[in-house]
Amino acid sequence: MPGPASFSSRERQLRSRLHLLITNAEGFIHGSIIEMARKCGNPGCRCASDDDLRHRSQYLGQTRGGKKSMVYLPAHLEATARQGVEHFQRALDLLEELSVEARLRLEKQKLKARGGRGAAKKITAKKRAPRKTSKKKSPKRKVPGKS
Ligand SMILES: [Zn+2]
């Protein structure tokens, strides 16, 4: 396993942000907040005449194992649920970014393991090339370089 020394500064930053989030967030909820507007059926109610006055209520929607579910959120729990959903999304975003960093590291490690010095030589050769020519990749430099 790679030690903290091999983490890029970007990766270290992401890890500490995730750590902070996990430490401070009250909860993580994988789902979404859904608002439903319905008519109660009472013909004398305001909702019967005006669609804008339908009764609105919040639900927490989730999908687990391909099954969708909705659970009613009483008003006093709306904010908590909304936060949980946001925290989950933020953690997921951080994990996605960490995944990118880990993959980059994996590729670096692969290069190292492949040839040891050979891989290092290739990199120096690439770095040296732009000095001779411009930024363009000219096919010329490949011919005299490798023989
Ligand atoms: Zn009504």
Image: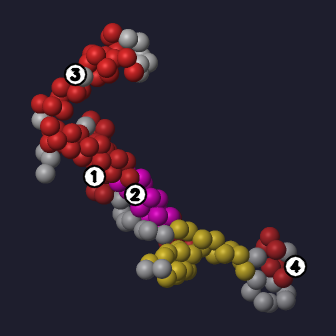
Task: Identify which amino acid the numbered label 1 is placed on.
Answer: His
Q: Mark 3 highlights which residue?
A: 147
Residue that extends furthest to the front in the rendered view of this protein: 147
First of labels 2, 4 by sequence position = 4
Q: Mark 4 highlights which residue?
A: 49
Q: Mark 2 highlights which residue?
A: 92
Give the CA distance from mark 1 to mark 4: 51 Å
Task: Identify which amino acid the numbered label 3 is placed on.
Answer: Ser
First of labels 4, 3 by sequence position = 4
Q: Is residue 17 above or below residue 115?
A: below
State left or right for residue 119 relative to residue 47.
left
Q: Is residue 49 above or below residue 141?
A: below
Task: Identify which amino acid the numbered label 2 is placed on.
Answer: Leu
Q: Secondary structure at mark 2?
A: helix
Residue 30: image x %, image y %?
A: 44, 68
Label 4 neighbourhood size at 10 Å, few (<14), some (14-19), many (20+)? few
Label 1 neighbourhood size at 10 Å, few (<14), some (14-19), many (20+)? few
Label 2 neighbourhood size at 10 Å, few (<14), some (14-19), many (20+)? some
Residue 17: image x %, image y %?
A: 32, 47
Q: Residue at x 27, y 52 (%)?
A: 19
Could you tell me if residue 130 is visible in this image?
yes
Give the CA distance from mark 2 to mark 4: 43 Å
Among the 4 quarters of the image, the one containing residue 121: top left
Depth order, front residue of 42/89? 89
First of labels 3, 2 by sequence position = 2
Q: Which mark is residue 19?
A: 1
